[in-house]
Image (cartoon, rainbow, N blue to C red):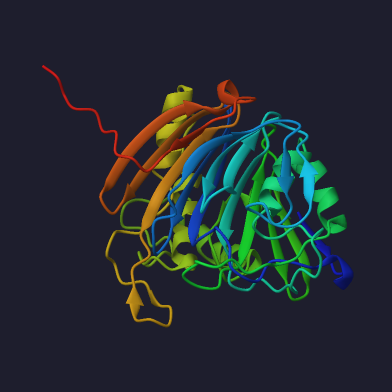
Amino acid sequence: MKFRFATIALLVGLSSASIANACTSVAWNTEKGTFTSRTNDWVEATNPTLGGIQQGDMRSLQGNGVGDFYQVKYDIVAVLAYGELVHDGVNSEGLQVNTLFYNPMHMPTASNPSAITQFVFGEYLLANYATVDEAVKAIPTLNVGSLALEGMPMEIKLHWSITDKSGDRAVIEFDEDGINIYRGEEAMVMTNDPSMQVHIENQKNHQPNWENADRETDIGSNGNANAKSRFLHASYFQSKLTEPTSIQNGLMKLASVPYRVPTDAPYKDFGFGMSGYATEWTLTQSLETGDSVFEYNFKENWNTVKFNVYELMGKEFRVALATSQISQLAI
């Protein structure tokens, strides 16, 4: 199901620097609840921190203390990047946000301190809404706008997925023709540009080959790291998953689905020579139980951490996620 809000007055927002990167996000609805897994791919370390944001906290509308402030309605446990910017998170009601890079983002600049910037858009949804449906209905009424942030390696534009415990999911894209929101099954996989609509149509062209597939089947993915190929890769392997036998089994299965961009692989010339764009980290979660596995693989750090977001709700904490904590075998 696709919603289109074309009123230009409602389309302010998100075209400058931000916290999110080219990535893949996948959701999976099962008899044991909804699972999600996402990769975060980037040209540099984002120094992610796991942190709690509490109900009643006052948070800035434009990020890192900039702009007017608003009061948080729901507890949040989030991956924070570049300071206090919410990259991904889950709230106490079971609503989750993933933030991904989206080059076609088309929105004007924030013109006043009350605008919700791209740095805070995902956080604001988590802080104020309990379900995907609530958030989708509210989005066209929000005053949002883009704001540049010094220190970013390039201009960044965004889109978001929101998923809740019921299994409802939406992908939100701010395009030249308005706000495009994709719901349900067609929103279960997202990557980056081109638009979700292009990815969905491309997938339809290849899906007939998937029904009786084996290892020789051409699933449409060329094995490259570009967004079209990653979308087909994730869509195909997600479609082949069978029901999990446990929460742990579900987390493990879905974590194997998103394409992880290899370290040192040539990716793109961003204006300063060919750069890599490796998967910095992967986060896999059960929205039913809150069980989460965070895997960090970048530069000198190699780390896997398991935690439960619902058990951490309402607590004030900040824990670095990039620090290597691989256990040594003791015999």
Q: Is residue 159 above or below residue 304?
A: below
- Residue 255, given in percent of the width and then of the height, sits at 42, 41
The image quarter containing residue 264 is bottom left
Residue placed furthest toward the top = 331
Q: Is residue 260 visible?
A: no
Q: Is residue 77 visible?
A: yes
- Residue 281, given in percent of the width and then of the height, sits at 40, 48
Q: Residue at x 26, y 33 (%)?
A: 326
Looking at this view, is 234 or 61 the one in front? 61
Q: Residue at x 46, y 41 (%)?
A: 283
- Residue 94, given in percent of the width and then of the height, sits at 67, 31
Q: Quadrant of the C terminus?
A: top left
Residue placed furthest toward the left = 331
Q: Is residue 1 above or below residue 275?
A: above
Looking at this view, is 256 or 304 the one in front? 304
- Residue 75, given in percent of the width and then of the height, sits at 68, 31
Looking at this view, is 95 or 205 the one in front? 95
Q: Residue at x 64, y 57 (%)?
A: 119
The image quarter containing residue 259 is bottom left
User: On the rendered structure, is 195 left or right of 5?
Assistant: left
Q: Quadrant of the N terminus?
A: bottom right
User: On the rendered structure, is 241 left or right of 195?
Assistant: left
- Count of all numbered marks drawn on residues in the image: 0
Q: Residue at x 73, y 30 (%)?
A: 55
